[in-house]
Every structure is written in C-alpha cells, then in structure tokens.
C-alpha cells in the first residue's frame, strides 16, 4: 500500500493501494503538532525528531487580508489534480488528498504506525486466519447507514477480473478470491456479512500484511452503486460521475474545475460529527510556488513545501506562517528499466551508482534536512536496518573499473563502447524540480567522464507515469511515499503488480515470502532485513535520499495536527478557522 511520486515533491502519481490513516476513530489519534516543542527547529536546527517539530508563527497580525476575509472556507494548495476521484482507480496522489476527505477506512494508524480503529474494531483468531470487523455507527452522506455488505462491494471491485486499477490484491490470500475473479462463484467465499455490523474475512494462510491491507477497505454504497458493480464488467462503476458521490468521509465533493480546483462541503452525517469548517478547496499551485501562494494569502495550507533552510527562512520572515517539520515517510530514487540491455548487468548498475555523489546532491537541495538512503525503507520505521548495506560512496575509479570488468571500453574519441554499441541512454524527469535541477547536470557530467552519453528529456507527469507503466523508459527520477505496511513486494518481486523495472531475483522473492509469513515482529524484522540487503546488492533502482516534510499553514488554521504516519488529513473534522 504505497504510492509513487512522479517528482520528488508535490506533483505526484499514485501507484498504490490505499494509505491506512483515514478517518481515525481511535483513541490514539495524532497529537504531535499542537503539543510539540518549537525549540530546535525554531532556532534553525535541522535535528528533526521522529515526532516532528513546530516552527511557530511570531506575528499573526501579518496575515494577508485576502486570507483573513475568507469565511468558512479552507484552501489547501496541491500541484496537479485530474478527474480521478474514484478511490479504487485513482493514480494521482494529489487527488488522494481529496479522497482522504471523502472516504473512511475500516482501520487507521497512529503516529507510530500502529493499527487502530477506523470505522470498525478488529479481532483476529488465534490461528491468524479469521479477521472480524465490528462496525461503528457509520453513516453515508445521504443519511443511510453503512453496513458490512457495503464493504464487501469494495472487495468485489478489487477482485473482479475486469478491475484494472492500481491496487494489488495478490498479497493477501483471501479464501475464494481466485474463484470469484475467474467467475466460478458469485460471491467471495472468505468474505461474509455475519450481520449488518459484522464483517468476517477468512484467509487461506497467515499473512503479516493482512491487517494493513484489509483495514484499508472503504464502503461502497449498495443502494447507490450496487448495480454498477457487475461481475466481469466494472466499466459503469469506473466511469461514474464522482460529483456529489455518496460516501462516509467528513466531506463531499461538490465541484471540480479542470486545471484549477476541487471543492468539497462538510458532510453533516459524518460519524465523528460534522466538520467545523464548511468548505474545503483544493487549489492547484505551480510546483516551486507553494510557499509564495501561502505568504500571499492565496492558500491556507501547503503540505508540500520543500524543506530546506532557504524555504524555512522565507516562512519565518512572513511571521504569520506555522511550519510543521516531520520526517518524510518515503524516499526519492532513480528508476531503472532493467529490461534495457544496458542495465541488466549488475556491475554496470553498481558502476553508475558509484559515479554519483549523492551526499553532495542531498546537501545541495536539502541541507541538513535530508540524508542519503541505501534501501527501500524509511529510517523512521521500526523495520529499518542498515546492517550489511553497501553505502556506494562516490568512487569514480571504482565505477570505471566495474564498467571495464563488464566489457565496456573507451574508443579513440572517448566514447564507452561494447560490441560496437555506444553506452547511451535517456533520463526522463519533469522540469522545475529542485532535486532533478541538481541531479541531471551532475549525472550528465559524471557519466561523461566515464565515456557515457546521458541525454535528458523533460515531460509532464501523466506522460511520464504512462511511460513508466509501459516500461518505455531508460531512467527516471521518482519517489515512493510509504505507509505503515512494510510489504512492498509488488514492486520488486517477479510479476509484481507494480514491478515496472522488469527486475527479478528468486532470493528476494523468498525473502518477501518469509516476511509475509512472519508471525512476530522479530521474524518480520529478520525477513525484511534480508530483503533490504538483497535489494541493496542487486540495485533494481538507485535510492537517493530521505528528506523531511515542511507542512506550512497560516494562523487562521487551528487544531492542526500531523505526523509522518498520519498526515494532517486524518484530522480534518477537528480543524477550525480563527
């Protein structure tokens, strides 16, 4: 359950299942932002704690009049929306902000990533095969009660043979899933409504990812949309109009203006109580202009401000801007097409990484608010381990030696050649990104010294993501936004639903299987430590950095809360405007 950003910051595309954090009804909701000390971050230190730190506004009177005069409306800046507001099909992570406001999930997680109640409480049988969800008194936005059958609709979409969305149902072995997919049964044998408020799900074997995956299920109204969920043909459901969509989230999508904004109004029937702010507007803001939009009063919240000393100083200078700094639950990376003959040699992949000075890159872009990463897990996770990892510190001589061992030599003109073919490839990215603005020239120069020709192409996000899905690329810059579920096997396992690198290694597949079969945290940690070591050795991609988030908001916004694992969207119904 992860999502991929096309760029390193705000205009990003979702390539994942759903993020466990929405509509938290549990007792351990995030309390970080309102209770955190403002000491180290406020004084300019970059020692961001795992809980996050607040750089508080110093003079609320500086708030621009255009923002102060906005009544009952909160404007949130995002980079790029599209008309994909169907939770089951969305692949745009900016749109996902809107979807968090529209929908609720069975479970949530707290600021440490622990599973807590969402719209239901869950119990698991002693053999780890039966999950029972007891629903709370949840209601759809049209006033009708949410029942267990409404959640079964979500599984029927996910497991349908015609489902072609980004979610991957393969990692959780639900009983009868394959028979439903293949049309042998009209119902999913392992998923039943014991009564209106009790949902039972049975697995065929233990699975450490099940609590996260099953808990991310949303209800789909049987009354409104049941007729559109036709086994073998989901075209009607996929194409339905999402304006005024009936769901159980705190807000209802009421309008969408292409290239401009999405407007949502408060759901009076929300099960945790009607939100205090009547209207939310998610407004498109050009990448790189996030803080400017906030300081001019155009928006009230900017969740994707580049976290570096310059941006933080700009926010401080405005005086009415609060900045919540927290470790990013994710990482930036360079994607490789391992089906390209240039990159299917491990020595070549290693050489190209040794040629890059990632430490200088991270320092240049983020200062002390970022660090080099060498595996596919954030450093704030309890699963993170750097044991046995190669740090691939910049070493041009090592890079040249590995290329020579792989059979590549320079010709008389200095071009790197093998079997009469030049080492030449294209790097794809988007313009105006602070990371690629530094990374691309660095790569071109470093590889040129090795005799390699790297050309760059700048394309828009949707085009780039399509190229990635079709594996019609050589290299790209992207990023993952993670969540509490450690399972990312669908990216790196052979045949994984989102394995768009074409990479495979049977050892990695076995290590992931061990992680999914683990019954204790110790077993999981051991299994994923092996995963990280193998991926670090094989390099199906180049991990570049982990950074910090800067979520900026003006002094109009009260009771703002966020953490790496929950995000501010988990608390929308509690926000108020001064």
Image (tube, grey):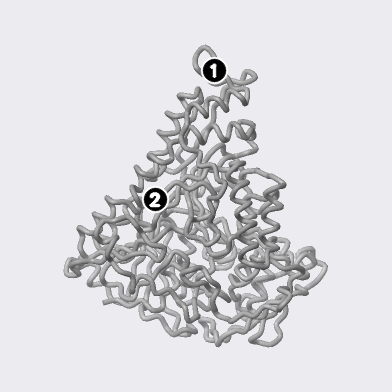
Where residue 57 sits in the image (x, y, percent)? Answer: 23, 66
Residue closer to the observer: 310 or 208: 208
Q: CA distance from mark 2 to mark 1?
A: 36 Å
- Which label's residue is closer to the chain start, 2 or 1? 2
Please give the name of the residue rendered at 49% of the width and 30% of the height, measured from the top-left corner: 454
- Label 1: how many Cα within 10 Å (few below 14, some 14–19, many 20+): some
Please give the name of the residue rendered at 57% of the width and 28% of the height, measured from the top-left corner: 402
> What label sits on residue 410 in the rendered view?
1
> What label sits on residue 370 in the rendered view?
2
Residue closer to the observer: 296 or 85: 296
Q: Secondary structure at mark 1?
A: strand
Residue closer to the observer: 155 or 39: 39
- Label 2: how many Cα within 10 Å (few below 14, some 14–19, many 20+): many
Residue 348: quadrant of the picture: top right
Where residue 271 sits in the image (x, y, percent)? Answer: 49, 84
Q: Is residue 343 visible?
A: yes
Placement of the N terminus among the 4 image quadrants: bottom right
Please give the name of the residue rendered at 36% of the width and 52% of the height, measured from the top-left corner: 369
Please give the name of the residue rendered at 55% of the width and 73% of the height, measured from the top-left corner: 115
Q: Nearer the viewer, mark 2 or mark 1?
A: 2
Instruction: Give the mark count.
Output: 2
> What label sits on residue 314 in the rendered view?
none
């Amino acid at each position: 359950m992860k999502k991929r950003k096309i760029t390193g910051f705000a205009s990003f595309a979702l390539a994942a299942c759903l993020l466990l954090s929405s509509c938290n009804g549990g007792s351990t909701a995030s309390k970080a932002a309102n209770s955190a000390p403002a000491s180290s971050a406020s004084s300019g230190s970059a020692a961001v704690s795992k809980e996050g730190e607040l750089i508080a506004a110093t003079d609320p009177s500086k708030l621009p009049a255009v923002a102060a005069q906005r009544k009952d409306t909160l404007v949130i800046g995002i980079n790029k929306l599209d008309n994909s507001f169907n939770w089951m099909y969305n692949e745009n992570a900016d749109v996902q902000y809107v979807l968090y406001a529209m929908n609720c999930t069975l479970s949530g997680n707290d600021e440490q990533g622990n599973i807590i109640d969402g719209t239901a409480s869950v119990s698991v049988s002693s053999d780890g095969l039966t999950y029972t969800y007891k629903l709370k008194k949840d209601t759809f936005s049209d006033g009708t009660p949410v029942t267990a059958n409404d959640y079964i609709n979500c599984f029927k979409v996910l497991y349908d043979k015609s489902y072609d969305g980004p979610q991957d149902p393969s990692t959780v072995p639900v009983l009868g899933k394959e028979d439903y997919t293949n049309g042998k049964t009209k119902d999913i044998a392992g998923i039943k409504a014991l009564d209106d408020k009790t949902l039972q799900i049975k697995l065929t074997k233990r699975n450490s990812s099940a609590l996260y995956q099953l808990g991310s299920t949303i209800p789909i109204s049987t009354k409104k949309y049941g007729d559109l969920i036709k086994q073998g043909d989901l075209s009607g459901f996929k194409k339905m109009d999402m304006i005024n969509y009936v769901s159980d989230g705190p807000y209802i999508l009421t309008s969408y203006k292409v290239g401009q904004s999405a407007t949502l109004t408060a759901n009076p029937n929300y099960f945790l109580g009607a939100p205090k702010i009547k209207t939310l507007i998610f407004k498109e803001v050009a990448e790189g202009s996030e803080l400017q939009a906030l300081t001019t009063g155009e928006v009230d919240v900017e969740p994707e401000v580049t976290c570096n000393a310059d941006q933080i100083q700009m926010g401080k200078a405005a005086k009415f801007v609060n900045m919540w700094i927290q470790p990013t639950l994710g990482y930036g990376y360079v994607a490789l097409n391992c089906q390209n003959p240039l990159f299917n040699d491990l020595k070549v992949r290693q050489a190209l990484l040794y040629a890059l000075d990632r430490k200088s890159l991270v320092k240049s872009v983020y200062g002390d608010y970022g660090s080099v990463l060498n595996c596919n897990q954030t450093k704030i996770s309890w699963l993170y381990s750097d044991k046995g990892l190669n740090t691939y510190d910049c070493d041009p001589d090592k890079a040249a030696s590995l290329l020579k061992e792989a059979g590549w030599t320079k010709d008389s003109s200095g071009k790197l050649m093998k079997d009469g073919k030049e080492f030449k490839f294209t790097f794809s990215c988007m313009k105006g990104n602070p990371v690629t603005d530094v990374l691309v020239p660095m790569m071109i120069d470093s590889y040129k010294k090795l005799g390699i020709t790297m050309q760059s192409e700048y394309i828009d996000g949707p085009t780039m993501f399509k190229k990635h899905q079709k594996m019609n690329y050589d290299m790209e810059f992207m990023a993952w936004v993670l969540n509490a579920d450690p399972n990312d096997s669908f990216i790196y396992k052979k045949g994984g639903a989102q394995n768009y690198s074409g990479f495979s290694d049977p050892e990695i597949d076995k290590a992931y299987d061990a992680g999914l079969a683990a019954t204790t945290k110790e077993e999981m940690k051991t299994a994923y430590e092996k995963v990280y070591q193998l991926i670090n050795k094989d390099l199906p991609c180049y991990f570049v950095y982990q950074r910090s988030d800067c979520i900026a908001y003006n002094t109009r916004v009260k009771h703002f809360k966020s953490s790496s694992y929950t995000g501010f969207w988990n608390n929308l119904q509690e926000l108020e405007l001064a």
